[in-house]
Amino acid sequence: MLARALRALVYGDTAMVKTAKPAPGKSVKTSVARQPKPARNVSAKSAQKSKPTAPPAAPADRAVEGDIAWQNRFQQNLLTLYTAIEQSPISVVIADADANIQYVNPYFTKITGYSAEEVIGKNPRIFQSGLTRNEIYADLWNALNKGEVWHGEFINRRKNGDLYWEEAHIAPIKDTSGNACQYVCMKLDVTRRKQVETELLDKHNLLTSVINSSTDFIFVKDAGLRTVLCNEAFAGALGKRPAELYGKTDIENGWPTELVKGNPEKGIKGYEQDDLAALSGETVRNMHDPAPAGGEIRIFDTVKLPVIGASGSVIGLLGIGRDISDRLADERLTRSLLLQARTLTRHMFDIQEDERRKISRELHDELGQWLTAIQAETQAIENIAGKTAPEMLGSIRAVKRSAESMHEVIRRIVHSLRPALLDTLGLADSLRELEKQWCQPRLGISCEFWLEGDLANLGDELNITIFRVVQEALNNIASYAQANHVSVHLRRVLGAAAGDDAILLSIGDDGVGFDAGQKLRGTGLLGMRERVIAAGGEFDLNSAPGQGVRIHIKLPVAPTWEEDYERW
């Protein structure tokens, strides 16, 4: 038998092998004479040297020479097989029909710790750890009893008690009758591979748990745009489990073709366009990515990044999508309410300006005329009294001065309520007049006004907004800033397209300043900010204690609140 022949070769006595040349169609019959067993460490080379030299054949005995030559070749082939098995980097075990071990190679000893002498004649169950399932052994013997080759894995125990994994291939060796007379087993130690597989599985389970805990869509695609990993939220959008999507493209998984390929007529970009960009090495973000979820089309903010392999090339892409539909709806509602609030504020300012205009007109037309009449009458009385009652001149002149002072006060009130030049000459002249009225009485404060660009035809609403902001800012500076210098810079900048022009207004002082991080108090700054925002503008304030105040304002020449809302 094979094991006995190998043992004979292992023990270095190849003369023990007797072989008869097979007749045509017959199998080789090999027998091994029982001889004392020499030392195990006899080398293959020594075994070769120990072969007896055949005596010279008689010329007439050609048949005998042929048999001897065939026998030598057979022995050489058997020796080659023995050498290959002895030096094999896998364990080789040969057992008899009762599964008792007849032969093991040196690598077996290296892996298990058992020597050949310790296991020859014993059943392989001595290696069992008790951790291999009984179904494995049942499947093994079911295959071998059918004369089939079995392949599987065992958890066995080394001589020192350590556990190890083996991948085994076991095949029956049949006699001339077709019955199994021996079994040959080749086993590979796969302990390290199993450890790596376990580590990878643990990491995979950890990663899966992490991504499944997120409500965002998380997915990974290979270079062929097939899904190789995703979380439950992503798969759940299609009513599936993650494993059902693996190895398939978006369309194969059931994503709408229109969303995958895109539809320019409907403004749909398509997933594939961003996928291909990510595979080219780009990081892509789509803040309006439609996808089915919960039985409806939702809007996602999706980021796709290239996945770089060990070679440095892109091997796939990672995608993360967050459902922002509710946020967008809330933002639309907020902007709608804000628009309504700004519209109401603008309407209130309009009403306020109308009331100011009416009051200004009443003061100018009614009270102003009465004061003018009083001044005229007082002058006439003064002229008469100078001739007839000189003692009355002091009182008359006091009344005259009071009327003149009252007239000047009313004139200032009228101008503050509604600057006459704003209606007649426009914004620029009204601001020049405001500069003159504000700076002249305050000789300790230097004033600088710069007006640049075309400030004509800005419209009544924008003119009033600019004028009131400058007016309120100057009043605040006069009341609280303790400043020595004030600057006002107003200019119109042209936009890239028609209707994109803007007004830039900067107002600054070198006064005491304040902490701009604190909540604004009073109606001055708050009123200025509300006016600017109501006009569709931007309001920015910079200040710190001891560093004065700077206000920067940007106003569109044409308000765009409604246009912005519609675009949103």
Image (spheres, rainbow, N blue to C red):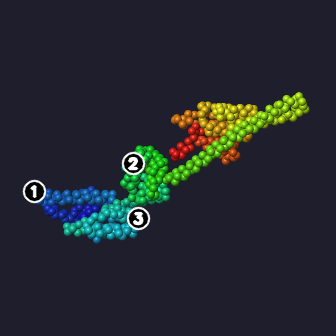
Residue 275 in view, yes or no: no
User: Which residue, given by chain and number where applicable, does mark 1 sit on?
Assistant: 59
Residue 551 drawn at (x, y percent): 65, 39
Estimate how packed mark 1 is, as few (under 14), some (14 to 19) or many (20 or more) residues with alpha carbons within 10 Å.
few
Mark 3, residue position = 163
Q: Quadrant of residue 281?
A: top left
The answer to whether residue 403 is seen in the rendering is yes
> Which tag is nearer the camera, tag 1 or tag 2?
2
Looking at the image, residue 67 sits to the left or right of residue 110; the answer is: left
Three-letter code for the amino acid on which mark 3 is drawn? Leu
Give the residue drawn at x 72%, y 39%: 362
Indicate the secondary structure of the residue bearing disc 2: helix
**Between 357 and 90, which is closer to the camera in this rendering?**
357
Q: Position of residue 173 (x, y in %)?
A: 25, 65
| Residue type beneath disc 1 | Pro
Mark sitting on residue 261: 2
Give the residue drawn at x 44%, y 53%: 291
